[in-house]
Image: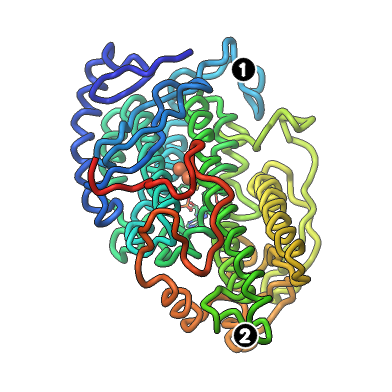
Amino acid sequence: MTAISNEKIPNNVNLSEDKKLQRALEQWQPNFLSWWNDMGPEGFQAHNIYLRTAISTDVEGWAHYDFVRMPEYRWGIFLADAVPERKIGFGDMMGQPVWQDVPGEHRNTLRRLIVTQGDTEPASVEQQRMLGHSCPSLYDMRNLFQVNVEEGRHLWAMVYLLQRFFGRDGREEAEGLLERRSGNQDKPRILGAFNEPISDWLSFMMFTMFTDRDGKYQLLALAESGFDPLSRTTRFMLTEEAHHMFVGETGVQRIAQRTAALMKEAKNEDVRTLGGIDLTTLQKYLNLWYSLSLDLFGSEISTNAASFFASGLKGRAKEEKFADHVAMEGVYSMDVPKVGTGELIREDVPLRSAMNEVLRDGYVDDCQRGVDRWNKVLREAGISHELKLPSRRFHRQQGVFSGLHFDPDGKPLSKEQWEAKKDDFLPSASDRAYVKSLQGKAIVEPGQMANWIAPPPRGVNAKPVEFEYVRTEA
Ligand code: BYC
Ligand code: FE
Ligand code: FE
């Protein structure tokens, strides 16, 4: 069992024995808190929230529940236990001992990877900061804040690595992570999806379903890293990540369940007349967040990905599942657009250059399993209509399909056809206005649910659904 110390910065990395690092992190801490106060959940910083906090990193200890005010949440530095004698599991250095320090030749690349990962965490908090004011229930509000404080902790996880292993550059990057802002023209967050607005709860649930799931796959790939501190920190992050995807998957599932019930009541199944979210609108939000999240894997053919893999910095999710860990031979056959014409042709891409696509494959399958569970709910309610993941080519802004147009089935469209049809595929201004209109005011009566979503089957940590998860007083 790895106990977490009860210091100013809770940790299981013996922080008090490294005074220089401790000082650096204690200098960064007030800047983090000031960022949290400015950019964290708006209007609820003084409320008491029933939150899960880590008190140790083993199975029993990391899920301790209590009421806390968010600014007093115990953000800290938690690494999963070291694996004794761990060896690099893939790439050119396969079989050599893992690094406990940063190899000089990989310093810049590793820093970029860590900064890119770290940047997404505060970005998501910024994107979600107004949602408390329109929550469908106290249960949902509490889940939102749980996700937010944990994304804050994921930022700490990356900042620890930067401050501990990257000297002055690392300290500057740690400041930069608090300076960029989601959606800001002059200092945007690094990756596309993290600059998109999340201004309603349907977007939030699709985001935690699809975008947090990119987080899962990227963290799985980084957990394979030959840089052992990165591996250990991402392994612990993955335990927290599971809850984020739970919030997304079950959130959309509850909407689907409610929509199905309203379809039975409404004339011509028109659930909007009863204040529900119709399946067409659900599908459009799915199309949007899934395609934005596919972009987060980078290009299908990537020399960056090849060199991350070759140098042992970033592997594939669950690398041990694969037979060949060197990947010098073999190809990945994919359909890519022919330059100039956009016509699709089959191409054999050297495996290492296709690592982003390999990671995306696992992600797509995982998303499909979630969508299948949504469809099961619809089916059991007697609805034959199904939700569907669009083609990987649809609405892409990164990689070989960017700049081209495809419909959700992957059929090429001209620019004119796309413009004429895009409101059928993606949320239109009026869809967004409708979804927002359903969420005018927060539902804060314990146990009450907004009309457009079904209650969850159970509450948090064996508490009832009608438990008062968010309180104005202690
Ligand atoms: N938007 O070879 P390419 C999470 C850039 S989510 C903007 O195609 P590469 C979370 C790329 O940076 C997980 N730019 O891709 C979820 C490169 O720029 P440079 C986050 C993009 O490098 C919810 C250029 O395009 N973790 O944790 O193989 C809530 C060409 O690059 C995008 C990570 O991302 C984009 N979508 O792979 C909270 C892991 N895609 O070098 C948290 C760390 C690509 O030309 N990052 N570009 O300036 C990585 O492993 C890689 O950076 C990427 C890109 C997979 C993102
Ligand atoms: Fe995260
Ligand atoms: Fe997350």
Residue at (71% x, 64% y) in the render: 378
**Could you tell me residue 266's position as x and y percent?**
63, 81
Residue at (33% x, 43% y) in the render: 49
Q: Amino acid at mark 2?
A: Lys
Residue at (69% x, 46% y) in the render: 362
Closer to the camera, 3 or 81? Answer: 3
Q: Amino acid at mark 1?
A: Lys
**Could you tell me residue 98's position as x and y percent?**
55, 18
Does the Cβ of the disc 2 residue fall within 8 Å of ligand 1?
A: no
Q: Is 330 displayed left or right of 356 in the figure?
A: right
Tally of numbered discs: 2
**Could you tell me residue 281's position as x and y percent?**
58, 75
Q: Is 160 displayed left or right of 299 in the figure?
A: left
Marks 1 & 2, CB-CB < 8 Å contact: no
Closer to the camera, 296 or 442? Answer: 442
For the C terminus, which image quadrant?
top left
Query: Distance between the Cα atoms at labels 1 and 2?
Result: 52 Å
Indicate which disc residue 87 carries. Answer: 1
Residue at (55% x, 47% y) in the render: 245
User: Please, is residue 238 above or below residue 443 in the view?
Assistant: above
Closer to the camera, 428 or 451? Answer: 451
Residue 70's image quarter? Answer: top left
Identify the element where label 2 is drawn.
Answer: helix
Q: Which residue is mark 2?
A: 421
Identify the element where label 1 is drawn.
Answer: loop
The disc, 1 or 2, on the residue closer to the chain's N-terminal end is 1
User: Please, is residue 176 above or below residue 252 in the view?
Assistant: above
Q: Is 325 displayed left or right of 104 in the figure?
A: right
Mark 1 or 2: in front is 2
* Residue 35 appears in view: no
User: Please, is residue 384 above or below residue 136 in the view?
Assistant: below
**Could you tell me residue 357's position as x and y percent?**
67, 50
